[in-house]
């Protein structure tokens, strides 16, 4: 069964970007892939769980911190209570994705405008 965790808050702490999860991240395995949800204006980091996939939804309000990540090349971690897990290959995937989105109407004009406006 697939699951979705929405990131509602993120902070930079101890030289890493912490995405604060609203549900447990126990047992999740990073797939090193980022997808796009053009309808809801978010990036989605894909993780495996024992029953399928967990989608880490990173909505537009978090994007300014992602932009800072690009400048400083800060590692990205997800945190739920005392659990932390690095989202491996996040930086590289995000750069590739942003390069693909810019000027590409396949993602929808509004998504492209939002991405270009922030990044």
Image (tube, rainbow, N blue to C red):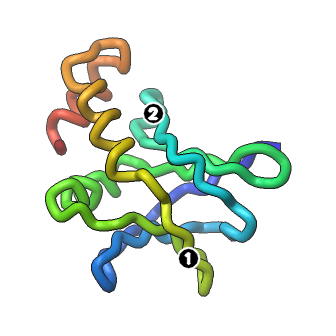
Task: State left or right for residue 22 relative to residue 90.
Answer: right
Location of residue 98 in the rendering, given as x and y in whole percent from the top left corner: 27, 34
User: Looking at the figure, which quarter contains the C terminus?
Assistant: top left
Could you say whether the residue bearing mark 1 is in a helix, strand or loop? Answer: strand
Which residue is the site of mark 2?
Answer: 36
Location of residue 76 in the rendering, given as x and y in whole percent from the top left corner: 40, 64
Identify the residue shown where x is 42% and y is 52%. 89
Figure check: 38 above or below 7:
above
Nearest to the observer: residue 69 or residue 42: 69
Could you say whether the residue bearing mark 2 is in a helix, strand or loop? Answer: strand
Which residue is the site of mark 1?
Answer: 84
Task: State left or right for residue 96 relative to residue 7.
Answer: left
Foreground label between 2 and 1 = 1
User: Looking at the figure, which quarter contains the N terminus?
Assistant: top right
Identify the residue shown where x is 60% and y is 83%. 81
Identify the residue shown where x is 21% and y is 54%. 70
Nearest to the observer: residue 95 or residue 44: 95
């Amino acid at each position: 069964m697939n699951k979705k965790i929405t990131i509602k808050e993120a902070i930079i702490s101890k030289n890493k970007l912490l995405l604060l999860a609203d549900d447990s991240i126990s047992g999740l395995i990073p797939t090193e892939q980022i997808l796009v949800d053009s309808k809801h204006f978010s990036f989605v980091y894909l993780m495996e769980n024992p029953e399928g996939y967990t989608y880490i939804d990173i909505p537009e309000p978090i994007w300014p911190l992602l932009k800072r990540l690009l400048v400083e090349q800060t590692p990205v971690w997800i945190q739920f209570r005392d659990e932390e897990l690095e989202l491996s290959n996040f930086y590289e995937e995000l750069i590739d994705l942003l390069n693909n989105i810019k000027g590409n109407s396949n993602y929808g004009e509004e998504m492209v405008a939002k991405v270009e406006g922030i990044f």
